[in-house]
Image (cartoon, rainbow, N blue to C red):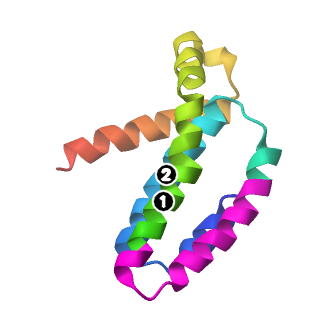
Amino acid sequence: MHYVLLLAASNLPKTLFDHFVIQLESFLFYYIFTKSPTKELERNFSLWADELRQIAKEVNEDEQVKKFNIFLQERFVKSMTIKEDELTDYLKRYTFNSMQQYRTRCMLAKLTQYVDSFLLR
């Protein structure tokens, strides 16, 4: 379901696209682990894809970066901030059997990715 956003952002400059991928991964992590309904995401992603396509079409680089940052703030950061307490609570109560295995694998992969990023520096 997040591929529609990646496709919409694919025409962004590489630095913006790479930053977008990181932000999208973080955003999805919050939604996956708070067990939020995906219907909401499906609806939002199609609307957000339109916004991203418009941002990618912006010819003025400074204006593009400004619009891109506003998009991230309004769409991702606000949502993650709202879910922060819920995620913290859920992770405190997490046990191996309290979540589907694919979610646990996802969490372990993110932790591994985070640790690897520090080891490769």
Task: Count neighbours of disc 1 (C-alpha within 10 A) and say few if under 14, some if 14 to 19, many if 20 or more.
Answer: few
Determine whether, in the image, residue 38 is placed left or right of residue 67: right
Mark 2 to mark 1 CA distance (whole Å) = 5 Å
Q: Are marks 2 and 1 in contact (CB under 8 Å)?
A: yes
Q: Which residue is mark 2?
A: 73
- On the rendered structure, is 62 left or right of 5? left
> Mark number for residue 58?
none
**With respect to residue 104, does 2 lie above or below?**
below
Report x, y in % for residue 2: 66, 58
Q: Quadrant of the N terminus?
A: bottom right
Decide: few, some or many residues near mark 2? Use Cα within 10 Å; few <14, some 14-19, many ≥20: few
Q: Which residue is mark 1?
A: 70
- Residue 119's x, y, as percent? 21, 43
Image coordinates of residue 40 in percent, x first then y, are: 78, 46
Q: Quadrant of residue 35?
A: top right
Residue at the spot x=35%, y=77% of the render?
Answer: 62
Residue 100 in the figure: left or right of residue 77: right
Name of the residue lying farthest toward the right = 39
Residue 8 is one of the magenta-drawn residues: no
In the rendered structure, which segment of residues is drawn in magenta?
43-64
Front in this rendered view, residue 23 or 99: 23
Kindly identify the residue that appears in the image at 55 percent across and 52 percent down: 74
Residue reaching furthest bottom?
59
The amino acid on which the numbered mark 1 sits, given as a three-letter code, is Ile
Please name the residue shown 47% across and 52% down the image.
23
The residue lying toward the viewer, choosing from 111 and 17, is 17
| Mark 1 residue element | helix
